[in-house]
Amino acid sequence: MERRTFLLLLASASITPMKAVSQAKPARVDVAKLEQILKKEAERNLEKLSKEQVPAYYIAYRVYDTISAEGNSTFGELSRPSVCNRMRWAQVQLRVGSPALDNTHEVKGDDSGAFYNSTKYFKIPLEDNEKAISTALWLNTDEVYKKAVIHFQKVQSQAVTKVASEDKAPDFSTEKREVYHEKPYQEKDVRKYMSELDKRIALYSSYFNSNKELTDGNVSYNVVLLRSSFVDTEGASIAQNSFQFRIMANARTVADDGMELPLYKSYYANTFDELPGNKQVKQDMEWISNTLSALKKAPVADTYAGPAILDAAAAGVFFHEFFGHRLEGARMKLEASDQTFKKKIGEQVLADDISVYFDPQLRTYKETPLSGGYVFDDEGMRGRRVDVVANGVLKDFLMSRTPIDGHPVSNGHGRGQIYYAPVTRQSNMIVETSRPKTDRELREMLVKELKSHNKPYGYRFCEVSGGFTNISRIDANAFYVTPLVVYRVYADGRQDELVRGVNLVGTPLSIFSQIGGCGDDHVVFNGYCGAESGSIPVSAVAPSLFVKIIETQRQEKSQELPPLLNRP
C-alpha cells in the first residue's frame, strides 16, 4: 500500500536560539450540554448493543464544530467575496468483540482497506437540540454496528483460513481516561479579522502585478476555529479548541519549453498577532516574483547521483516523509507494511549527533508557530512528547490506541479528520543536532566530497512543495520529493547556478546512512499530511543537511506552449 503525503505550507525561518514554549492549559469549565448528550447516548446504545449475539464493547462519539472564514485575491483584486461558515459534523466509532480481537483487526486481502474501522460521519444540528442530536446518533450507531458485525465475522473466519499475524498485540489498548473542557469561542471571534485580512491579501497579491511573466499571482487566507468534542463509553470527555490562521501565496510562470514553474509561500499562526508584518510579506512576494523570472530562463537539470545539501526547509519534509512515517506504530501491525524500524529499538539508525522527537504540546519552536499541536488527540488521549531517536539510537515509536508488540499503550498520536477513523499519525516533529555546522562548513564538506569523486558540481535543494513515500512490502520502498528551487554548486568555486526540472528520489535507509552533517539553522515547515485518516496539520523542524549521495530525475512537463498573449 502506498503512503502519500503532501506538505504545502511553508513558514518563515527562525534562527535565534530560544527555548520552545509549551501550550498553555486553558481554564477548565463545566461539561457542556453537547458532551452530556453524547455521553448519555453512548451509554444508552452500548447497554443495548453489548447484549447482542456479537457484543459491542466500545462506542465513541466525536464532533467537529467549525467556524471558518476565507478570502482570495489575484493580482491585487479580491477575486471572490470573503465568506464565514459554520458547520457541525459528528462521527461514531464502534468496536465489537473484545480488545484482544475486534472488528478493526486487519483482514488480509480485504478490499475495505488495511485500516478498516467501523465509523461513519454525518451532520448534526448547530444548536444543542437533544432530541435531534440523539436521533442522529442512534440511527448512525445502529448502522455502524451492523457493518462492524459483518467485518468482525471476516476477522474470525480468517483465523482458520489465513496464516497467523506476526504481531500478537491486542487490537485496542487499555488506557486511563480524562475529562477536560475548554471554554468555547463564538462566531464573532472569527468575523472580526475578515476585513483586515481582505485588505492584506489584496495588498500582497498586488506585488505580483509588475511582473508580466507571471501567469498566476494569488494570495488567500483561511481562518479556522475548530471546537472538537470527544466522548466515549470508558469515561473520556474532551472539548478543546484550535484556532488557526493561514495566509497562502501562490505564483507561477511557464518556461518556453512548456514547463510550469510554481512557487509557494505561506504563513501559519495560532493567533492573529503572530501573522507576519506587511514589510516581511512584501519582501517574500518580491523574492517569489524575481525567482520565478530567473527559473523561466534557467537550464533544465540532468539526472544526477552524488553529494548535495538540503536546506532546512527541504530537510524538514525529507525527515517527515522518509523517517516519520516509518515510526507510526499502527502501520507496523500491518502484514503488508515494510516495518522498517519495528525491530530496531536500541539500534543506531541515524548519525550519533542527531536526535528526533515529536511533541504535540508545543505551540512554537524558537518563536515560530507550529501547526501540528493539540492537547488531546482524536482518540481522547493526551498528546505527549515522544523522544523517538536520541543520539542516533532508536528509542520509541508514535502510538495510538492500536498497540503493537512491545508498545502496549498510546502516547497521544491517534489522529484523523472527522471523515475517517483515527490512526497513528505525526504531530510536531523536531530534528536537532549536537554538532551543528555553519553554512560555510556544509558547503566545504560538499565541495570536498565532489572533488574526491571528480564531480564538477553538486546540488543544493532550497525549497520544496512536498512529496510522498511508499512503505509497502509489495512495491519498491522509495520516496519522491518535488523541489521548487534548486541550485547547482560547482566544485571549482564558480557562482551557484539556478536550475529547474528536478525531482529528488531514492530509498530511505540508503539516504539516511549518507547524512554527513547538520547545519546550525532551523526552518519550521507547517503543512498538511494526507494519509488513510485524511489530511491533518503537521509541522516539521529540521536543520540543513549535507548528504553524501542523493539521486535525482527529471520532472514531467507539459507539452503545451506558454501563453501567446501578454497578461492584461
Image (spheres, rainbow, N blue to C red):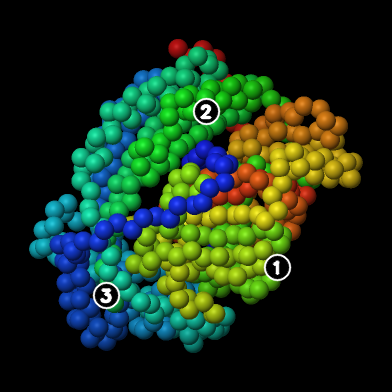
Q: In the image as oriented, which residue stretches furthest toward the front? A: 18
Q: Quadrant of the C terminus?
A: top left
- Residue 218, position as x, y percentages in the image: 44, 27
User: Residue at the location (42% across, 64% down)?
Assistant: 383
Of residues 173 and 97, the one nearer the viewer is 173
Dot 1: few (<14), some (14–19), or many (≥20) neighbours within 10 Å? some
Amino acid carrying label 1: it is Gln
Among the 4 quarters of the image, the one containing residue 37: bottom left
Mark-to-mark CA distance, 1 and 3: 40 Å
Q: Earlier in the sequence, mark 1 or mark 3?
A: 3
Among the 4 quarters of the image, the one containing residue 312: top right
- Residue 4, position as x, y percentages in the image: 53, 53
- Left or right of 75? Residue 447 is right
User: Can I make out residue 307 in this image?
Assistant: yes
Residue receiving disc 3:
235
Q: Secondary structure at mark 1?
A: loop
User: Can I make out residue 7 in this image?
Assistant: no
Mark-to-mark CA distance, 1 and 2: 40 Å
- Residue 339, position as x, y percentages in the image: 60, 69
The label on residue 284 is 2
Mark-to-mark CA distance, 2 and 3: 49 Å
Residue receiving disc 1:
348
Amino acid carrying label 2: it is Asp
